[in-house]
Amino acid sequence: MSDEWSLNPSSPVPLHRQIYDYMKRRIMNGEWPVGTRLPTQRDLAAKFQVNRSTVVYALGELSADGLIAARVGQGTVVANNTWSLLAASPPPDWNRYVTSGLHQPNLQMIQQINRAEANPGFLRLGTGELSPELLPTDQMKQVFSGSMSSRFSLGYSEPKGSLYLREIISAYLQTKGIDASPASILIVSGALQGLQLISLGLLHAGSTIFVENPSYLNSVQVFQSAGMQVHGIPMDRQGIQTESIGRLKRQHNAALLYTIPSFHNPTGVLMPSERRGELLQTCIQERLPVIEDDVYGDLWLDDPPPPPLKAGDRQGLVLYMGSMSKTLGPGLRIGWIVGPEPVMERLADIKMQTDYGSSSLSQHAVAEWLSSGLYEQHLHRTRAALTSRRDSMLAILSKHYQELAEWSIPQGGFYIWLRLVQPVAMRLLFEQALTEGILLNPGAVYDRQDQQHLRLSYAYASLDELERGLLRLAALIRLNSCREF
């Protein structure tokens, strides 16, 4: 029930009447179907920033009109709307349709995070994207307003994406040690769409997917919604532990393994060359296909990471994914998958059935950035800014968190994986921070059993916001660690 509407304190219309009119309008036009559960009075009062009595007054009028009703075990729900008031037959129960859809909803906490990230008033300590001030907005405007390449088109691109862009990406991948022809590259609308295409085109319902534990993949429902099981493999400070993969593959009949070797999300771990070799050799031996997610690979801060797994793949075992979302701008929605040509053709066919190709404008922009040298210049500036931000966050942690938490120094990417020393009610900490305008990313988002970690990001919030937010967070941690559990 989130939107941009807010009360107008200067209006001659009383506040309770404004709330009544707003809620009635949402109900009568069908936006809130019959059966929709309303937030609690306390939540509504917080949303509208009014006294609870004002909300109670507005709800009382809605109840008197027969639009809402209190039901045992359900709270207050929408009871009638335009259709049920005017028609003899009941309206469609859209909530039943919503709950019966194939795609599983996000965890409640993830939904809360997604909503809060859309609110500019929140201080975001864990957001996984670059700050707007680090995005090359002005240069991007120049790319779009400058002379257009003769290859530019507003029409549909071919199924695998712009050939021009794929040729440029092929050359770009050579710098990473990956030999990939344009025919073995598929342009996708971000790495997440790549995962969706793989789940739809290559895997069967009931398949098991191996992931690092914790894993970004636990924060999205892309494989679970396709009827698959996600099984976590333990990590250490060098990445996924390879010893048990063979045994677990046979035990679970795993279909593939998903990994982020460079600057892992959420832990920030960088897998060294030796571990990468062990992992690739194990997967070759077990004939276990690999999805290598390398969206953070260009964001090294101290030294370049080792070559990707794909660089050592001589059997077409690895599907390699890259993206511009973490470096050039999430709004471009351009990424790529590299793999055997028949696999790319299969995924391209499914992509054509779902969106008929990624944005021509975005493909052209990425091609211009990569071919002109602008992208490498931008990376140089971005790495310098992220290094400064990382060091500032580490200084704050060293000063205020020595007795509260443990952490490692990330060598790239966005994240510090903060381990709290004392047990804390993480859900309560999340809610308390939220009420104070601070948005956290708890470890449970990436491992359902984790109650001890927070993912901190130095990429989004300003340095002033980082200091203010981390100081307040330290106070909340101290407050909650004193409680008995």
Image (tube, rainbow, N blue to C red):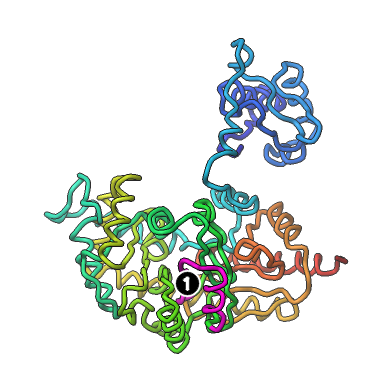
Residue extending farthest to the left is 150
- Residue at x-position 70% and y-position 34%: 38
| In-front residue for pair 107/113 | 107
Quadrant assignment, res 55:
top right
Answer left or right for 115 relative to 293. Answer: right
Residue 169: x %, y % from top left: 25, 67
Query: Amino acid type of disc 1?
Result: Thr
- Residue at x-position 47% and y-position 69%: 258
Location of residue 158 with respect to 35 vertically, above or below: below
Report if residue 226 lies within the magenta region.
Answer: no
Mark 1 sits on what residue?
259
For the C terminus, which image quadrant? bottom right
- Residue at x-position 63% and y-position 57%: 439
Residue 389: x %, y % from top left: 52, 73
Badge 1 marks a residue whose secondary structure is: strand
Residue 219: x %, y % from top left: 56, 59
Q: Residues within 10 Å of mark 1 (few under 14, many from 20)?
A: many
Q: Which span of residues is magenta-colored? A: 243-263
Residue extending farthest to the right is 484
Location of residue 360 with respect to 296 vertically, above or below: above
For the N terminus, which image quadrant? top right
Report if residue 256 lies within the magenta region.
Answer: yes
